[in-house]
Amino acid sequence: MRDAQPSAIFLKDYSVPAFLIDATELRFELGEEATTVHSCLTLRRNPASDNATAGLTLHGAELELLSLAIDGNTLSESQWSVSEETLCIAEVPDQFELRCSTRIYPQKNTSLEGLYKSSGMFCTQCEAEGFRKITYYLDRPDVMSVFTVEILADANTYPVLLSNGNRTDVETLEDGRTRVVWHDPFPKPAYLFALVAGDLQAVEDTFTTCNGRVVELKIYVEQKDLDKCEHAMLSLKNAMRWDEQVYGREYDLDIFNIVAVDDFNMGAMENKSLNIFNTSCVLAKPETTTDAGFQRVEGVVAHEYFHNWSGNRVTCRDWFQLSLKEGFTVFRDAEFSADMGSPTVKRVEDVSLLRSTQFAEDAGPMAHPVRPDSFIEISNFYTVTIYEKGAEVVRMIHTLLGPELFRKGSDLYFERHDGQAVTCEDFVLAMEAASGMDLSQFRRWYELAGTPELDVSGSYDAEQGRYTLTVKQHCPDTPGQTNKPPLHIPFSVALLGEAGALRLNLQGQEADSETADNTEMVLHVTEAQQQFVFSELPEEPVPSLLRGFSAPVKLHFPYRRDQLIALITRDTDGFCRWDACQQLGILEMTAAMESAKAGADYQLSADFSGALAQLLADDSLDKAMLAMMLVLPSEAYLAEVFKPVDVHAIHHARERLRRQLAEALREPLLQTYERCQDAQPYQANAEQIARRSLKNTSLAYLMLLGEEGIAQKAREQFAESQNMTDRLAALTTLVNNEDSAKAEALMSFYQDWQHEPLVINQWFQVQAASSAPGTLEKVKSLMNHPAFDIRNPNKVRALIATFCVQNAVNFHREDGAGYAFLADQVIALNRSNPQIASRLLQPLSKWRKYPEAAQQKMQAELKRILAEPDLSRDVYEVVSKSVS
Ligand code: 0A1
Ligand code: ZN
């Protein structure tokens, strides 16, 4: 809990550590009451530090100090002092061995940081600053040490005892305990330390590396989950192979372990050779897991594995550099998932997330650069900006350099910095050195918060056969940053003619041609305003802009409707086709909302439904793409487009348009629904996933027609489907349409799956997301359901966060009850789990986007939270930055 005034720490204040720890020996005595941790640290003064006489200050929190000794001599109480967060020893030699014993209480640890218990097993989470809750230490990523870990625990209760690296010793003691020793030869920061003790079973496999080394792979789970590990194991092997082939990175130890735990604040953690996973990101089988769940497992397994190089072998100097490992690793996992499935679909999914969630963050009170300048609590900075915008920044470097030079750059980065803790600047320097490219202006992407906006216009001179694109850029002000200089924006373009993309002849400007036939180019937008002139164009082209979403910007171009339809039906860039659909959808939404305001009825435009009908008739189109193109812009994205955000008007207009679309496309949707039925046994491959996605999108539309015959199909699908994707899609549409079978379906679903917590979370989610009136009361009553547990983050996310984030009409109820509910939950979680409390709070922090009446109610709840005694640093930072 916080001191009177939590203060910010600043990147500009970084200094090297005064001491280094060459070796770390830990001995854990795991007990049912308490755990004792004995540490032996080999310390020496850091030659790079300019303070040669400094005392030793170690981090530590919530620890009971039992004893302290330097070089074998026990220290008396006058020789050290402890505060809530530190242990200081004023006088120490230049080189010494520090022995320290502490007592901790993992059974009482509800924050899920440090050592804690989950479903009877001991496990750890040390990133970012959790190790200090285990023992006193230099808990900062630039202190890298070789760890040896001894674990003692009751042999019956904890038959599996794991830590990082290789197991070097094991014995059974006379007192009924087992003693094991693990040694990790690679120096690492404390945040990568991990320990697991429990009654677990493993699924085993091997991987032979490119150099013929055999690596033992194990996924440890509870016995009942042994049948849900196959997909994670396959994903792991695919990721290991992919990293060799695409990045030349070979795995470096003889074992790689994954452990699944029920209670986990995030998705997973890349501890060296002992990844710890939220069960939701590792367990999958067709009967319990949706296609999206399968894809998430694949992506997260790969992400954590890729960290072995981008994060572990080369780590971060300080937490301001978090995106160095996260942005790069997200880029790597996105490319991997693209290669394993459908690249365009993956790209569209990622861009959707970025544009709804990251753009919102970048426009709100918590906006921060990819490399922040300051923070109060680092846990608040595991954000979509650090992860997803950070990945976009790496992607832009990839686009600017091209794949070969990018690979040269990454090779150089790994070679230069293997075993080091480095900065984002080191990454850019390696990319520059390998490519010869000047990225000086590009660096601003790391420094500036806010989403840049591109205002583009085009004009065609028929006589000269010239097309001129005028591009203006500006980046809005964000907290602490005004009047920003222009960024270096890679702007990928093509010009479409009637018969396809036209050859590009760009006058006088430097640009890289992307395609052999010269039909796509990356323009370097570097100034506040710039013109690009293309010549030898026999017809007025339709510009296809920001292809593949080549930069994380908001693009404005005054497209005519016929131009958007041209892009929808014949652009060769999948992202631009989808985006043109979204833009036409926004035009429809705008018109529908204006009509509603004037009390008039709006009728969906025929050109829009006509274009979608044309797509439905096109058998050559990827079905997953088609499914995405059929979906109107999400409410979350529309909340980024309309200002102020009237969530009720948006929801009702969107629902009306959806119904009208269903009416206009009834026949083709019915045919599509039937055509996409799968006779094959379930597989999580791209083709089947695409088919299910299109089938269930069609069903969701058809259900809006309120026809008994269609409802019957949904009920049948619910009752008969053997996989969770189809079953949950049917349940969702029965719930969303208040079907007569809703209550019974929810009940039978619960009966069938009450023994599977991950499935029950989906059951909570479906109910929490329903736009029906009274959902808040339903959510409150579900919080008293025996299957709900507020201490479990997955359940909080499934029920509470789903309601607050994905159910805008109910969360933004006009009486403010949704806001009060959220504030109550934040206050309840503030003490038990500050990280989850702070994350949950985010929707309230965006109050400025909403109409006046909502603003006041949201602010009042923020103030109520701020007035709470003992606010955690996590919650305090978000509330204090967003209130006022
Ligand atoms: N490094 C992990 C994410 C992670 C961060 C913090 C955690 O606990 C507070 C846990 C996991 C990743 O990127 O996957
Ligand atoms: Zn990561």
Image (cartoon, rainbow, N blue to C red):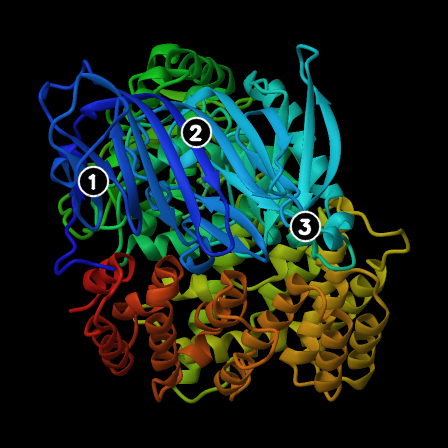
Q: Which label number is shown at residue 283?
A: 3
| Depth order, front residue of 618/216 | 216
Q: Is residue 166 left or right of residue 329?
A: right
Compute the Cα span from label 2 to label 3.
24 Å
At label 2, the amino acid type is Gly
At label 1, the amino acid type is Leu
Q: Which residue is mark 2?
A: 311
State which tag comes first along the sequence, 1 or 2. 1
State which tag comes first along the sequence, 1 or 3. 1
- Is 692 above or below relative to 273? below
Q: Residue 474: in sight, yes or no?
A: yes
Q: Residue 571: in sight, yes or no?
A: no
| Depth order, front residue of 495/130 | 130
- Is 657 above or below relative to 675? below
Q: Which label number is shown at residue 817?
A: none
Label 2, ligand 2: CB separation under 8 Å: yes
Badges 1 and 2: C-beta atoms under 8 Å apart? no
Compute the Cα span from label 1 to label 2.
28 Å
Compute the Cα span from label 1 to label 3.
41 Å
State which tag comes first along the sequence, 2 or 3. 3
